[in-house]
Image (tube, rainbow, N blue to C red):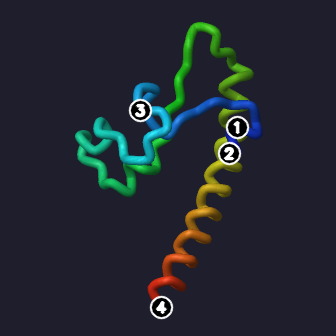
C-alpha cells in the first residue's frame, strides 16, 4: 500500500500469479522458508525506467518497510491474544 500511495507499482509475486496469496514456488525452490518467500517483493525495470523512477522507489522503500513491520507487529500481537483465549 505504501508503494501504491507513492505511485509505484510493485508486486508480491509473479505476474502470472497475481492475486494469489501464497509463497512463490520459485523463491521456495531457491531454498527460502515460507515466511521469507511471503516477504518477497517483485520490482520490474524496463527500457522506460528512469533514474527518477529508481530514486522514487528508493525513497518509498523505507516507508514501506516500516509500514509492513508495523502491520506485522499488529498481526503478531493479535495472534498472541487469540492464543491466550
Q: CA distance from mark 4 to mark 3?
A: 36 Å
Q: CA distance from mark 3 to mark 1?
A: 19 Å
Q: Earlier in the sequence, mark 3 or mark 1?
A: 1
Mark 3 vs mark 1, foreground winner is 3
Mark 2 vs mark 3, foreground winner is 3
**Residue bearing mark 1:** 4
Q: Earlier in the sequence, mark 4 or mark 1?
A: 1
Mark 4 vs mark 1, foreground winner is 4
In the rendered structure, are the residues bearing label 3 and label 1 in contact, judged by CB atoms less than 8 Å apart?
A: no
Q: CA distance from mark 4 to mark 2?
A: 31 Å
Q: Earlier in the sequence, mark 4 or mark 3?
A: 3
Q: Secondary structure at mark 2?
A: loop
Q: Residues within 10 Å of mark 3 (few under 14, many from 20)?
A: few
Q: Secondary structure at mark 4?
A: helix
Place of residue 47 in the rendered image (x, y in percent of width and height, measured from the top left): 58, 8
Place of residue 2 in the rendered image (x, y in percent of width and height, measured from the top left): 70, 45
Does residue 13 appear left or right of residue 71 in this picture? left
Along the line of sight, the residue nearer the viewer: 13 or 46? 13
Q: Residues within 10 Å of mark 1 (few under 14, many from 20)?
A: few
**Residue bearing mark 4:** 84
Q: Residue at x 53, y 35 (%)?
A: 11
Place of residue 9 in the rendered image (x, y in percent of width and height, measured from the top left): 64, 30
Q: CA distance from mark 2 to mark 3?
A: 18 Å
In the rendered structure, are the residues bearing label 2 and label 3 in contact, judged by CB atoms less than 8 Å apart?
A: no
Q: Which mark is residue 17?
A: 3
Along the line of sight, the residue nearer the viewer: 48 or 51? 48
Q: Residues within 10 Å of mark 4 (few under 14, many from 20)?
A: few
Q: Earlier in the sequence, mark 2 or mark 3?
A: 2
Amino acid at each position: 500500500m505504501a508503494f501504491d500511495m507513492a505511485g509505484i507499482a510493485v508486486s508480491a509475486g509473479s505476474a502470472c500469479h497475481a492475486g494469489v496469496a501464497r509463497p512463490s514456488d520459485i523463491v521456495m525452490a531457491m531454498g527460502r522458508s515460507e515466511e521469507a518467500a511471503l516477504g518477497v517483493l517483485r520490482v520490474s525495470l524496463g527500457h522506460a525506467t528512469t533514474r527518477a523512477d529508481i530514486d522514487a522507489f528508493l525513497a518509498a522503500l523505507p516507508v514501506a518497510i516500516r509500514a509492513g513491520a508495523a502491520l506485522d507487529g499488529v498481526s503478531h500481537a493479535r495472534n498472541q491474544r487469540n492464543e491466550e483465549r
